[in-house]
Amino acid sequence: MHFILQSDNLSKDIQHLKFFTAKKIINFLQQKNIKTILEQLAFYKKSHKNQTHYQLWQEGCHPKIISTVGMMRQKIQYIHDNPVKRGYVDLSEHWRYSSYRNYFDTGFEVVFDGVEIVVW
């Protein structure tokens, strides 16, 4: 999963996001008894992890500082193109979970001033 965000403590916030979402998703899968996905998550669990039975997220965090308008555009384009490259959809706008429509269908404009993103 790729996303763009700003935080005073990015590593800690991403760790909390991963912990919270993994717990919620695994609880949901267990409640619905969705064994095939749970078995896949158990298969990918790292052998050195003794406290958990499942591996939902990849280990690590690799944040990149976005320091120019060009870099911001490139990262947004990469995120939008990813479902197409993976073969999930034919066009970026077809991926229902994408922010693509926020940028291209609604006429919103992203302004990057080096500190924050403002959408209007």
Image (cartoon, rainbow, N blue to C red):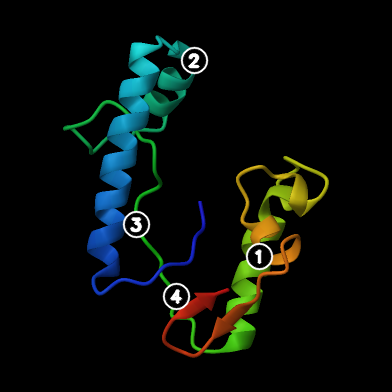
Q: Are marks 4 and 1 in contact (CB under 8 Å)?
A: no
Whole-percent x, y for residue 37 in the image: 47, 21
Amino acid, disc 2 = Thr
The numbered mark, 4 or 1, whose residue comes first in the sequence reads 4
Sequence-wise, the earlier of marks 3 and 2 is 2
Q: Which residue is mark 3?
A: 60
Give the residue pinned by disc 1: 78
Which residue reaches farthest top?
33
Residue type at mark 3? Gly
Q: Disc 4 and disc 2: Cα gap in Å?
A: 34 Å
Q: Amino acid at mark 4?
A: Lys
In front: label 4 or label 3 = 4
Q: Secondary structure at mark 2?
A: helix
Tags 1 and 2 in contact by the CB under 8 Å rule? no
Q: Find numbered disc 4 in the image and state the secondary structure of the residue it sits on.
A: loop
- Residue 65 lies in what quarter of the image? bottom left
Alpha carbons under labels 1 and 2: distance apart: 30 Å
Give the answer, above or below, for where 3 lies relative to 67: above
User: Is label 3 in contact with label 2 (beta carbons under 8 Å)?
Assistant: no
Q: Which residue was labeled with disc 4?
A: 64
Q: Residues within 10 Å of mark 1 (few under 14, many from 20)?
A: few
26 vs 110: above or below: above
Disc ID at residue 36: 2
Residue 66 place in picture, x, y as percent: 49, 81
